[in-house]
Image: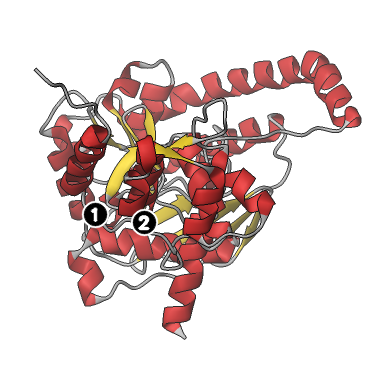
Amino acid sequence: MEGGSSREEEEAAAAAPNPFVHELQLTRLQKVKIYVLGVVLAPIRVALAFVVLFLIWPFALLQVVGLPDETLQEPFSGWRNTVSHGSVYLLSRLMFFLLGFMRIRVRGQRASRLEAPILVAAPHSTFFDPIILLPCDLPKVVSRTENLHVPVIGALLRFNQAILVSRHDPASRKKVVEEVKKRATSQGKWPQVLFFPEGTCSNKKALLKFKPGAFISGVPIQPVLIRYPNSLFLPVYQPSAEEEINPTLYANNVQKVMARALGIPATDCEFLGNLPVTVVGHLRVALEPRIWELGKALRRNRCLAGDIKCQPDSLSVCALGRLKPTDLAHRLGLACPEAIEELCIYFQQDSDGNMDSREVALALETLEGEHDPPALTSRAFETAHLHQPVSHI
């Protein structure tokens, strides 16, 4: 049964929509509302929210002003913490109310800091997702060091005792890992730490690959599902012995649990720097729509995942390097004209509708995932020279 479930999850991930593309289809009434309310109501809401944000500033400063560095490295306590925490919480709730979040519905029960020192929230889809901090009672967060220099935001990060990471300091990531482990294993001394493990926003149609940072400490975590207007606390996830020492495995398994609860696929898509990438076979490649859609088309027609009926080697040695649509259909075992046409549009075709067999062969080999990156690179050079004309001197 577990094997069947795993196969179903793999097929769902393969057929997942591109999580970085959002196709917005609005009715005429919705468009009218956007135009009218965007001009009349939105400026008022934003202006009032900024007023409240600036009111939060002095209470955030009250938490940290005048304290020595040694005190700032330990969890806050005392009257300052009571006044600052309560004021920032209430004003934050007022700010989100003014932005249109009249009510925050919460399902499930938030675990204590002893039960789950780490919270992971997904899917991350909007700039409003920090609203999840409110039902979580303002947990600590991870942010970029550069944000400390942003007015108001910097004060809020100091108030929050956020864990700061610098992209320009090679040693920064190691320090962050150590700090996360210290807080997660403090036996409830530190408040919970909240992570958005996807690391960036998506369109909510699939979960991005979870980064392992939240799972490095190997402690129990509590998944938090963000589904507007609801937030849902799932039961605490207790890692196995293998997951405790393998944060990547831990992250992947929690991603699958959350995706299953949301009813959406778990994918290998992620951001590397500013580039969206996905896993194709053994390669991590740029999320180029054509090969993404080709893989989906092949799987729809059962031409991948063990069902392929052709040998890529035979494709790459077709006469003169040209491949007719009928030849491709024969080698893939396809009889449906619509399926043949659907596959051929992903390749460049000449005036006769023929494709370059080398391009087709490499695409199939990459999607099949049987070759590692060095082998695929070697194959690319081999096929590139298969039909080169021989010079006679």
Q: Nearer the viewer, residue 6 or 149?
A: 6
x and y percentages locating residue 144 in the rendered image? 31, 29
What residue sits 12% from the left and 30% below the top? 170
Residue 35 seen in render: yes
> How far is the residue under mark 1 from the one under mark 2?
8 Å
37 to the left or right of 215: right
Q: Looking at the figure, which quarter contains the C terminus?
A: top left
The residue indicated by pointer 2 is: 368
Element at label 2:
helix
What residue sits 13% from the left and 21% below the top? 392
x and y percentages locating residue 213 in the rendered image? 27, 49
Q: Nearer the viewer, residue 368 or 115?
A: 368
Outermost residue on the right side: it is 29
- The amino acid sitting under disc 1 is His
* Up-down relation of residue 314 to residue 114 (above or below): above
Quarter occupied by residue 376: top left
What residue sits 53% from the left and 46% below the top? 132
Element at label 1:
loop
Residue 371 numbered tag? 1
Circle 1 crowding by C-alpha within 10 Å: few under 14, some 14–19, many from 20:
some
Residue 135 seen in render: no
State yes or no: discs 1 and 2 in contact (Cβ < 8 Å): yes
x and y percentages locating residue 280 in the rendered image? 36, 48
Quarter occupied by residue 149: top left
Quarter occupied by residue 117: bottom left
* Up-down relation of residue 309 to residue 367 (above or below): below
What residue sits 45% from the left and 60% below the top? 304
x and y percentages locating residue 217 in the rendered image? 22, 59
Q: How is the image coloured?
A: secondary structure
- The amino acid sitting under disc 2 is Glu
